[in-house]
Each structure stands twice: as C-alpha cells, then as structure tokens.
Amino acid sequence: MKQKKRIMAWVMVLMIVFTVYQVRDVSEAATKSVAGAWKKDSKGWYYKFSDGSGYAKDEWIRGSYVNKKGYWEKKWDGEWKQNKKGWWFQAGTWYPKNEWIQYNRKYYYFGADGYMLTDQWIGKYYVDKNGVWTKTRSTTAPDNPVKAWGALQVKGTDLCSSTGAKVQLKGVSTFGIIWDEGRDNINLEAFKTLKSWGVNTIRLAVYTEEYGGYCRNDVDRSRLDGIIENGVSYATQLGLYVIIDWHILNDNNPNTHISEAKQFFAKYSKKYAGYNNILYEICNEPNGGTSWADVKSYADTIIPIIRQNDDDAVILVGTPTWSQKPDEAAKNPVNQKKNVMYVAHFYASEHGSDLRNAITNARKMGAPVFISECSVTRASGDGEINYTAANEWKKFVNDNNLSFVEWSLSNKAETSAMIKSGCSKHSGWTDSDLKDSALFFKKWFGEN
C-alpha cells in the first residue's frame, strides 16, 4: 500500500511538472522581471529602468499599473490568470477586452472575450506565440475598403482599385440565404464581426434550383429579394464589397434558367447601378458535363444585360467542372471582356497542383482569375482538414495576389461551415465559437 501511494505521489509530481512546462512559454513572457527599481518621491512610487531609458509610464510593471504621469496606482494591482481557454490579465474585477496593455515593457492584445491573442496579426501589428507584439506592417487594411479603393477595375490579370493599384478581396460567403443554418447570420453585427477580422467582401449565395431557390415556383421571391437587399445594405454601411452570386448547382448548366437570370441581373444591375461596391457572379459552378461553350453562350447573353445598366461593375464568370477550368475560358474568352474575371474554386483537401496549374496557365494567357469560393476541406464541404495542402494554397493565392472567399457563414454540421453546430450566436463570434476551418481563414484574413 505504501509503495502504491509513493507511485501515485510521483505521478502527481510528474503531472504538475508537465503542466508547468506546457504553460511556461507564455507565463515567462508575461512575468519576466524588467531591469530597474521602484523609487519614491513626494508624489508617490515610480519605476526607473536601469538601462537609462527613463521611467515607466502608462504600463504594467510586475503586476502593478504605472499611470500616464509615471506613478503607481495601487488600486490597479493586477495579475495574469489562465484556464483551458487561455491567458487573461485581471486587476480586481477589471480585465482588458478589445485592447492592448503594456506589461513589463511588452505589448499584449486581449480579444472581445478578454483572452490574450497569440500568433496572429491584429490590424498591422503581429503578436507571437507568447502573445507579444513583435512586428508591424507598413500598411494595413483600410477601415473602409470601398472608400479607400472605390469602384474596382480589372487591369491585365489583376483586380485593382479605381486608381489602378492592385487590391486583394478577402471574403466570406453566406450559406443559402434562406436556409436555417445561415439565414440569420446576414445582419449588420455579423458583418461587423467579419470586418473586424480583416474581411472586406461579403458573398450573397442566391441558390437557383435547390430548396428555397430563386427559380422555384414554390418560393416567395419577394422574401429572397428582401434578404439580398438587406445584405447589400449592411455591407454598404460598413464599406464592404458585395458579390451577388447566382448560385447554380443542381441545375448544372446556367442556360437551364437563363430567362430567370436575365430578369434577375437586369433588376439588380439597375437597382445598384449607382453603387461602387457591387460585383456580379453570374454562374457559380457549371457542372454535370456543361462545356465552356455552353457557359460562354450564357455569359455573352447576361453580360450585355448588366452592361446596359452598369458599364463598370466587375463580373465573375464560373467555369466548367465546378469552376475548375479557368484555362478553358482563357482560350476562348467572353465577347465583352472589360472588368470580367473567371472563377476558380478550391477545396484544399481535394484540389491541388492541377488546379493551381490551370489558374497559372489561364493568367499566362491573359485571363484574370477570382477564387469566389474555397475552404480547407474536401469539395463536399466535409472531411478532414489538410493543413499542408491548405498552406500551399495560401501561399499560391498570396503570391499571385488572388482574391478569395471562404465557404461558408453557417453552423451546418460540416467541416467547412465556419460556426460550430452547437453555437446559436449570429454575430460576435469568438474563437471558441468557430470551427478549425474558420480559425485558419480568420488568421489569414488578418495577415494581408
């Protein structure tokens, strides 16, 4: 019995040691002493650095707050705390949220839930694995992308601002706009949350033939119109770009519902002719044996309808085999080429070098490519995440300054859905509310 107790005691010691080593990096970064000494004058205590750089001001030193005048305020005594979710800093009942604090001459940022952020860009500032600000970009995403970039244009193979500077749209796509898993996420606060991550574009997925689709006889089309118009309004208020996506899927060939498409794009291009933040995706994923000749015929019908109302809006044209063939489009482009881009979609766990080569070849032939849908899963939207493949795509997209949109803003029970299935929130999502696929993209949004 005594031997068993000794073994259990050693197991407990080893577990404690293991736990200490697990958290040592962050705790050491947070609590390592700063060289210097506390001193006192008639006004109170202050902290003088020993390297001759002066006195602490408006920062935390060893858990105590030194105010803007350089004096210790006892009421703000604070300490680092940790649980399974991460580290936070607490002084009495107060703890920082959505703000920076300086502690021991290092800067840390705390998110909306009060936990310290690590290994990501926050605006133009990068915090490392210990949460410490270590580097700064010379530029950052504009607070109001549309105001900064204006009406977009295509120059060569690049998407550019109104002044001709290259831009990269980084977006999130809604799920079916009328479906339960995502409908309620189309709201102003949700779009604000996405914008805070670095998102500058919202894609409104208007399904055509599926349940609730725009071309079905049993759908309340006015309800769909209301959701589209609300989505455009919310994004416009925030200075975000909007892709109105005619989301063909089960209908395979966009010509199946070309009469409805004519009416749809005539209506919306007229309604939003005076806007400078609208892009039109005229066919999402041609499939089921649909050829580029079929798609080109459709595009050559729809593009002139849009151009009757809007001379300049960027138009995205899907390509065959679920938008996997931009190189086929490049060989025989649409008739009206101004501000037209060709679509490619990738799902990193399934699509690889063949699709990247197709995109590269299309661009070599002068065809601009836009990735209007992507994720790090299989093409079904489910399956495991292949991070090696995902990072290969990330590098390729960034190296070529390609615009991209993540699929999808929903809590559907599949890997590519951004929000955990048990989460009922429709805005203000924290990392604990998000699936791993969304965390990958959230980090990416903040890096560029």
Image (spheres, grey):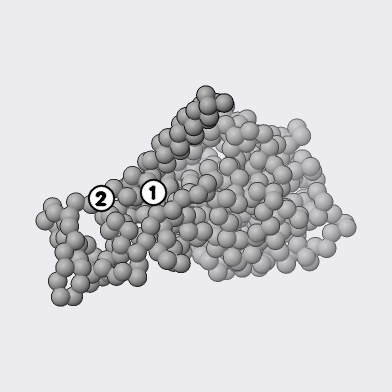
Which mark sits nearer the N-terminus, 2 or 1?
2
Residue beneath disc 2: 33
Q: Residue at x 77, y 45 (%)?
A: 255
Of 226 and 52, the residue lying toward us: 52
Above or below for 445 versus 384: below
Above or below for 141 versus 363: below
Please state if 141 lies on the left or on the right of 138 as rendered: right
Please state if 47 lies on the left or on the right of 249 as rendered: left
Mark 1 neighbour density, 10 Å: few (under 14) some (14–19) many (20 or more): many
Of 40 and 104, the residue lying toward us: 40
Work out whether residue 29 can be spotted.
Answer: yes
Pointers 2 and 1 in contact (C-beta within 8 Å): no
Q: Residue at x 37, y 54 (%)?
A: 108
Q: State the image coordinates of residue 442 (x, y, percent, origin top left).
A: 52, 48
Q: State the image coordinates of residue 428 (x, y, percent, origin top left).
A: 57, 60
Q: Identify which amino acid the numbered label 1 is placed on.
A: Gly
How far is the residue under mark 2 from the one under mark 1?
17 Å
